[in-house]
Image (cartoon, rainbow, N blue to C red):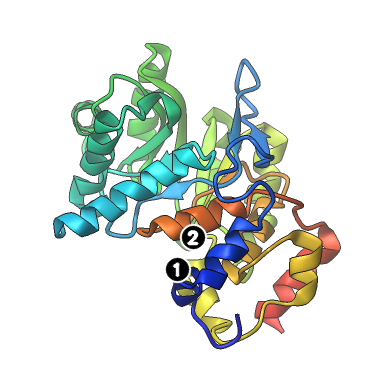
Amino acid sequence: MQGISRKKFLNTAGGAAALAAMPGGLRAADAGLVMRTIPKSKNKEQLPVIGLGTAQDFGAKAEPAVMEQKAQVIRELVANGGRLLDTAEQYSRGGAESFVGEVMEKDKLRDKIFLATKIEEGGGKEASSEAMGIAFKRLRTNMIDLMFVHNMQNTDVHLPTFLEAKAKGQFRYVGVSSTGREQDRLTTWMDQLDFVEFAYAVDAREAEKRLLPMAADKGVAVLVALPLGRGRLLSKVQGQALPEWAKQELGAVSFAQLLLKFVASHPAVTVAIPGTNRPQHMIENLAAGHGPLPDAKQRERIAAIWTA
């Protein structure tokens, strides 16, 4: 892969062949995706360790061909064994939720997707309830698997409302999210939560100090946002060849897969949710959930690629 971008690599015959050579091939829905149990699930429900985030203009209006490409990303998530799709009312100003709802309804995918969304409102309980109603409408469903208080915004108002909705069966799980500098404050509500969502990547490992250990200790599931570092990590290795040991020992065929394997290998991580608008990237990302995950020594070898 020396001298070639991720995009160009995936568009070549060699790139396609490399992905096809992954354990189980491109569509290995039943061939060994690593699964993680939701700690507070009553029936030991499991999720594939790689999912999909929709923060990257996923619902922004575009020409039909581009929108169809985005719809195909959701189809590839399901076709390749993924389940968790994460969105929010803020993404594309509600467009992401609406687009996800449209695709799920059209392609009859709702029962195949673990659906997570988020609400960030500044008002009181009434505003929280109104925002919930809008989310159900946009997503075209009467049950949302996971509802987050987004960016810890007004958490002490929204969280009790969400817990009430969970008790009524409108949500299956509740959580709080943050990807900013203050994400350590998620520990404030950890005792009340089923899930947390925060940023964690090979060059941003602060979560290893408090958030990840506390989540493991309290049985809280973890969604990892920005596991590829908003593209900065792939940019840093642009033009470099993937180390042979990563191919041979971990079955990785790209730096993106190596980064995702690093994140997914932390035992407290439930699902990593890289964002993408490209079907081939969705396939590649999910393939990172096949085969071995790095052990402690291999994790540090991966980290050294970006921190040396």
Of 301 and 166, nearer the camera is 301
For residue 133, above or below residue 59: above
On screen, residue 169 versus residue 92, left or right, reads: right
Label 1 packing within 10 angstroms: few (<14), some (14-19), many (20+): some
User: Which amino acid lies under the numbered mark 2 shown in the image of this protein?
Assistant: Leu
On screen, residue 207 versus residue 126, left or right, reads: right
- Label 2 secondary element: loop
User: Which amino acid lies under the numbered mark 1 shown in the image of this protein?
Assistant: Arg
Can residue 60 be seen here? The reply is no
Residue at x 68% of width, y 56% of height: 208
On screen, residue 76 versus residue 277, left or right, reads: right
- Label 1 secondary element: helix
Q: Residue 250 appears at what percent x and percent y? A: 76, 60
Residue at x 40% of width, y 58% of height: 276
Can residue 281 be seen here? The reply is yes
Of 29 and 136, nearer the camera is 29
Of 58 and 6, nearer the camera is 6
Residue at x 34% of width, y 48% of height: 72
Q: Which residue is mark 2?
A: 226
Q: Which residue is mark 1?
A: 230
Q: Residue 60 appears at what percent x and percent y? A: 20, 56
Q: Residue 280 appears at what percent x and percent y? A: 45, 59
Quarter of the C terminus within the rendering = bottom right
Q: Residue furthest right?
A: 297
For residue 20, above or below residue 189: below
Label 2 vs label 1: CA separation? Answer: 6 Å
On screen, residue 58 versus residue 188, left or right, reads: left
Q: Are marks 2 and 1 in contact (CB under 8 Å)?
A: yes
